[in-house]
Image (spheres, helix red, strand yellow):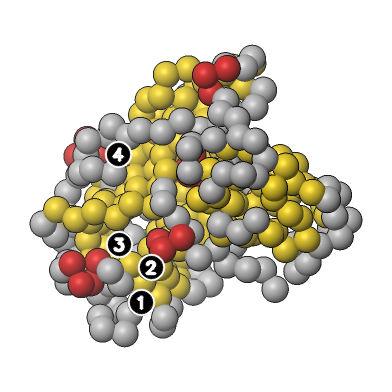
């Protein structure tokens, strides 16, 4: 059984971070796409409800366009809770994020139909930041902290996103609402427990940051750490050997889907199929190791 990964300031659009890049040279980080020029609180709120809850699954999908091949480093989403209090903010346990090659409702929303899929649990994901200013809540995902290089070609994509919320103390129909953003492309739609429906508004409020990529390698983009993973290949368990303190270990399969995250020096892939995996080890001094794992 696949183990679930238990893995931003208001409109500032200024984020930090350096993502490890192999075989690529990254130019200056910039805002690649944004609907945050005209953020507004929707009325009525119901058409843009979106959450993964104890009682249902509602996910809004919108579209975005990249004008150049880019490495994605940051996502920012803006909305509000039905009752935006510090206590209720704590009920946001994590997020799910899907990246699709095209914006379409002709197929179901799932890991299998996505280019990239992330299920990030707040407690275990330093790169997942949730802040509040008045009624407004900002959720930021720092892709670099996941140890994954998200490289997208120029073109149009779909993005589906929802917070994972514990709903015991809040009505399930008033959990999370997206703010509207500057209209772009196709109308945002909702995936509601297996079917698509209209939101009756243009775009949700979100932005994407990243870097243009070209062939080459920048030494400044590489951090090193004295570490070794063995045995490799392995039938089930891989061991990480390093004298440094490990602060994060993330493992992705060959399709870029997260399969495991922890801080352990033991990586147990016995529950996963044979194939190629990628591991990123981050140590307390900022050093990182990225290596291909072969499960036999």
Q: Could you say which disc has been placed on residue 93 in the image?
A: 2
What crowding class fits label 4: few (fewer than 14 Cα within 10 Å), some (14-19), or many (20 or more)? some
Position of the C terminus, as image quadrant, is bottom right
Label 1, label 2: how far apart the Cα atoms are: 7 Å
Residue at horizontal 54%, vertical 35%?
A: 287
Question: Dot 3 corresponds to which residue?
Answer: 48
Depth check, front residue: 253 or 20: 20
Query: Along the polypeptide, which appears first: circle 1 or circle 2?
Result: 2
| Total labels drawn | 4
Name which of mark 3 and mark 2 comes first in the sequence.
3
Give the residue number, with chain letter if any, for mark 1.
166
Residue corresponding to mark 4: 35
Which of pointers 4 and 1 indicates the residue nearer the eye? 1
Nearest-to-viewer mark from 1 and 3: 1
Tell me whether the residue at label 1 lies in contact with that at label 2, contact meaning CB atoms closer than 8 angstroms: yes
Asked if the residue at tag 3 contacts the one at tag 1, i.e. Cβ–Cβ closer than 8 Å, the answer is no
Mark with earlier residue (1, 3) = 3
Label 3 vs label 2: CA separation? 20 Å
């Amino acid at each position: 059984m696949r183990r679930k990964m238990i893995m931003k300031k208001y409109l500032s659009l200024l984020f930090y971070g350096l993502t490890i890049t192999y075989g690529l040279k990254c130019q200056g980080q910039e805002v690649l796409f944004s609907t945050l020029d005209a953020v507004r609180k929707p009325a009525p709120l119901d058409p843009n409800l979106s959450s993964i809850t104890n009682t249902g699954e509602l996910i809004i999908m919108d579209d975005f366009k990249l004008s150049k091949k880019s490495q994605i480093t940051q996502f920012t989403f803006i909305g509000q809770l039905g009752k935006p209090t510090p206590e209720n903010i704590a009920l946001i346990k994590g997020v799910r994020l899907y990246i699709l090659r095209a914006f379409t409702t002709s197929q179901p929303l799932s890991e299998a139909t996505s280019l990239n899929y992330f299920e990030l649990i707040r407690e275990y994901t330093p790169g997942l930041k949730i802040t509040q200013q008045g009624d407004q809540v900002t959720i930021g995902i720092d892709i670099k902290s996941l140890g994954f290089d998200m490289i997208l070609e120029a073109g149009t994509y779909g993005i589906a996103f929802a917070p994972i919320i514990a709903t015991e103390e809040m009505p399930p129909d008033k959990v999370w609402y997206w703010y509207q953003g500057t209209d772009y492309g196709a109308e945002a739609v909702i995936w509601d427990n297996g079917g698509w429906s209209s939101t009756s508004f243009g775009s949700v409020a979100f932005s994407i940051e990243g870097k243009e990529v070209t062939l080459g390698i920048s030494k400044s983009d590489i951090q090193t750490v004295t570490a070794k993973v063995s045995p490799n290949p392995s039938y089930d368990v891989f061991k990480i050997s390093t004298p440094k303190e490990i602060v994060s270990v993330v493992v992705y399969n060959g399709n870029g889907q997260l399969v495991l995250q922890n801080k352990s020096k033991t990586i147990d892939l016995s529950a996963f199929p044979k194939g190629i995996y990628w591991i990123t080890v981050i140590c307390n001094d900022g050093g990182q190791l990225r290596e291909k794992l072969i499960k036999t």
